[in-house]
Amino acid sequence: MMAYMSEKRVSTHRSTVQIRIKCIRAIVTSLLVGWVAMGVAIARPVPLSTDGPASDSDLTSYTIVATLDPDGGRISGTAVITVPKGMSSLAGKVNLDLHSAGTRENGDAKLIVEGIWSANGEKLRSETLEEEGVVQVFLPKALSDAQPVNSFEVRYSVILEESDMESYGYHIFTGVSSGNYWYPDITGSDGSRSRFFDFDIDVTYPSDWTIMTSGGLAEPADMPADASDGQIREEYRARHVEGCALALGEGFVLQTLEAGGVRVTAFSEPDLAPDFLKAAESTAEAAAWYRQVYGFFPVPHIGVIQGHRRWGGGFPLPNMFMIHQASLDPAFLTWITAHELGHYYWGLYVLDDGDRLGWIILANGIWADQLYMAQKRNVTLEEQWRSRRFGDWMVDYLQAMVENREQRLGVEREAEDSLGFDYNSLIRHSKGATGVYLQALRIGEQKFLEFQRQLLEDFRYKPLPEKEFISRLEEAGASGAEDFFSVWKRGDSRIGLDVRNIDDTSVVIARTGNVPYPVDVEIETPEGELIRQTMGMESDEVKVGVPGSRPLTIRIDPDGVVPMWNSAHPGIRGLYVEALFRAELTELFLIVARHHLTENPSDHRTRYLLARRFFRLADYGEVVSLGELETMPSSRYSCLAAIYATRAMGRKGKVVEARRHLNGLQALAVEFDLKSSWERANEEMQ
């Protein structure tokens, strides 16, 4: 989702990367010189295709002519708004939301309505309802039944404030909901609102600023952008979008590339251009995968814009998504771009039955991003779901569990602030996705993918009710899914099995949790014989006959499928270690992590977490022992543990020895993308 700019863009030999640089600062010049040295050529890009969902008669449409004046602190424009007959026919009036663009720091609305006219230029009757925060517009009657819509024109302005500049580095209107628009939002007199909109935009702005919108550039390829008196004029079109986002930054850079038939543009400050070029490349690669897997890509173009300066993660907007600036390392970008693209299938194509991104919709998108990451990393889907770094959905869910947080699925967003934790990430995303993943496992990867493809076909731009999803899942082969989710959604849901009894001839395994889910049990005799049985969804216990030899080794969930505390699989146990670490349950974490590391010394992630926690506790002797400094690190996390060990050694006064070890880690730190960690340790040594 993206918006395009004109003027200079740079096209590299690797792809059709196009960069528009509208700033003459030295850093931008050096960046451009660097690219030219690699064989770049200045070229004007072919404008975006405006192919996409056709205009629909039940959509509200906007034709906007606007001037963006960031130096003057405002947007001025006219919007011709075409209202579907169904929204206005009952009362012959609609409401303009005065809070469409949000409120200023002093509480005043940022949107100022300056006048309202009919399509033929007659001033329309309107009434400002201050308490309701709307301007009521009385529409002219349609000329005939053959003209099922009404159009009217609003002259308006929007105040630009510095708050977004401080948080993001630029002005941003997300276009997602009321309060986030740069144009007047309308509702019917009964509060009804279109779910999707069409936009035709003619915009003028200063040439030393850069914009991105949800629309594609509409001008012909051979027509230069209209630039006069330091101003640029361009036209954009967006079809069937939930709103039109606008980003406006001074001296920002646009970088555009294409892969697999999908065009991607990144919008960022010059200093972040290399990071967001990588983000665009990751997005294009993931988009090509989605197009291959699902058979189509749901939008004609996609934009990637820099997000909040202090946050991590991302957020989907119409035809573009944010990547927040707290984490921009390449491995994270590979995952977060795939995750955000999932929203354009699940949430903005197949719709939630109520929320913009409810848990059922989120879960389907997450399942897809985990399939992508599994194939990208060349691991099984089960291994990917046991990941503890990127796509760590089970860890997040278990963190909420060990912290004894609210576990209910379906909590309203308005109630989240009172919960005191990140419910959206840990429960709405992670618990919901884990539940859908567990049911998808029962029918298999390919069958669940076919199930998703059918939903995409049947629910194009339509809500997918939760009951419909679950009943179709049962029809696809996940019998008992309704019983599973009826408990999984509750706050007390737990999957649990444990040994109830052992006698001379058998072992009895009993269900200790309340969630019905099949769990495997494996029993190994002293002679090495393996006996395997499954606790079915409808069973409360299973009796496994075994020979008289003792002792027995009993493994519950030996394959590491289920997130439960006594799973025998080291991968699931590692998830609990991670959850305890994140939950700051230090005493319990140290006990469990040390025991886990004793049994699984190759779990380098746990070794690193222990070193990090002991370092914070100033137990430097423990940190040094965990670093294994006489052994060459074999992974990113063992290298991190070793770097912590050198810092701990320096704190203990052994600076010369610490420097020797640290110098030996320098090349590996670069290889494992740990240069900043190594440099921090090196600074301490000085």
Image: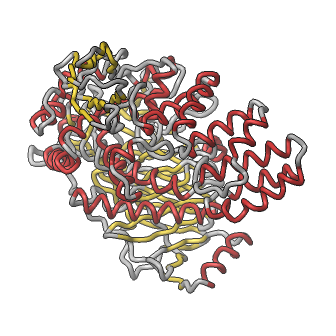
Seen in the picture, residue 367 relative to 108 is either above or below; the reply is below
The quadrant holding residue 220 is bottom left
In the rendered view, does 365 fall on the left or right side of 317? left
> Considering depth in this image, is 161 or 552 the residue closer to the camera?
552
Residue 121, image x and y in percent?
33, 50
Q: How many marks?
A: 0
Residue 561, image x and y in percent?
33, 36
- The residue lying at 42 percent from left, 64 percent from top is 264
In the rendered view, does 496 fall on the left or right side of 448? right
Would you say residue 582 is visible in this rendering?
no
In the rendered view, does 507 fall on the left or right side of 627? left
Residue 484, image x and y in percent?
23, 24
- The residue lying at 45 percent from left, 41 percent from top is 392
Residue 615, image x and y in percent?
74, 36
In the rendered view, does 636 fall on the left or right side of 345? right
Seen in the picture, residue 207 relative to 598 is either above or below; the reply is below
| Image quadrant occupied by the N terminus | bottom left
Seen in the picture, residue 448 relative to 268 is either above or below; the reply is above
> Considering depth in this image, is 115 or 632 the residue closer to the camera?
632
> Considering depth in this image, is 152 or 528 the residue closer to the camera?
528
- The residue lying at 32 percent from left, 61 percent from top is 289
Would you say residue 473 is visible in this rendering?
yes
- The residue lying at 56 percent from left, 43 percent from top is 601
